[in-house]
Image (cartoon, grey):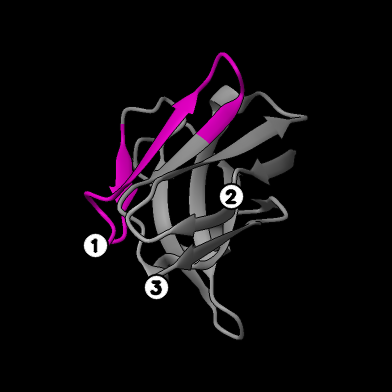
Amino acid sequence: VQLQASGGGLVQAGSSLRLSCAASGRPFINLQMAWFRQYPGKAYEHVATISSSGQTTHYARDLKGRFTIVRDNTKNVAYLLLNSLKPEDAARYYCAGRASVEEVVSESTDDYNFWGQGTEVTVSS
């Protein structure tokens, strides 16, 4: 599976961004998808997960309400909508996938074996 993340950029605090993760090489409908972010020198931090059907989502506690994960299984794309961005949201955002059709979703990096290259989000105050 190849994952291609895009949509990052430099924005002002309070702005919104839409990150995209395009998948190829495996039926997207069989993939559970997640977004993680990473600060320089730090470990990956879970942001959000969505089940293969799109029916189940799970968010990092502090991000729920500002970030939204959705997917379009007809276009093989998962999205992360970032609203009301704060300077502390500035990080490199990675999309990840794992072969699972269960509605039980994972927030552990150990469970994901397909990773995109990441997209940088910079937020100015």
Asked whether residue 59 is drawn in magenta, I would say yes
Q: Residues within 10 Å of mark 3 (few under 14, many from 20)?
A: few
Q: Residues within 10 Å of mark 2 (few under 14, many from 20)?
A: many
Residue 106 visible within the image: no
Q: Which residue is mark 1?
A: 61
Mark 1 element type: loop
Picture residue at 54% right of the left edge, 78% below the top = 43
Marks 1 and 3, how far apart at CA: 15 Å
In this view of the protein, which residue sits in the foreground, 103 or 36? 36
Q: Name which quarter of the figure residue 4 lies in.
A: top right
Q: Earlier in the sequence, mark 1 or mark 2?
A: 1
- Residue sticking out furthest to the top: 74
Q: Is residue 124 above or below residue 53?
A: below
In this view of the protein, which residue sits in the foreground, 37 or 82? 82
Rendered-image quadrant of the N terminus: top right
Mark 2 element type: strand
Q: Nearer the viewer, mark 1 or mark 3?
A: 3
Q: Position of residue 42 (x, y in %)?
A: 55, 83
Q: Which residue is mark 2?
A: 95
Q: Earlier in the sequence, mark 1 or mark 3?
A: 1
Magenta-tinted stretch: 56-78
Q: Which residue is mark 3?
A: 88
Q: Residues within 10 Å of mark 1 (few under 14, many from 20)?
A: few
Marks 3 and 2, how far apart at CA: 19 Å
Q: Position of residue 54 (x, y in %)?
A: 39, 28
The amino acid at mark 3 is: Glu
Q: Position of residue 94 (x, y in %)?
A: 59, 56
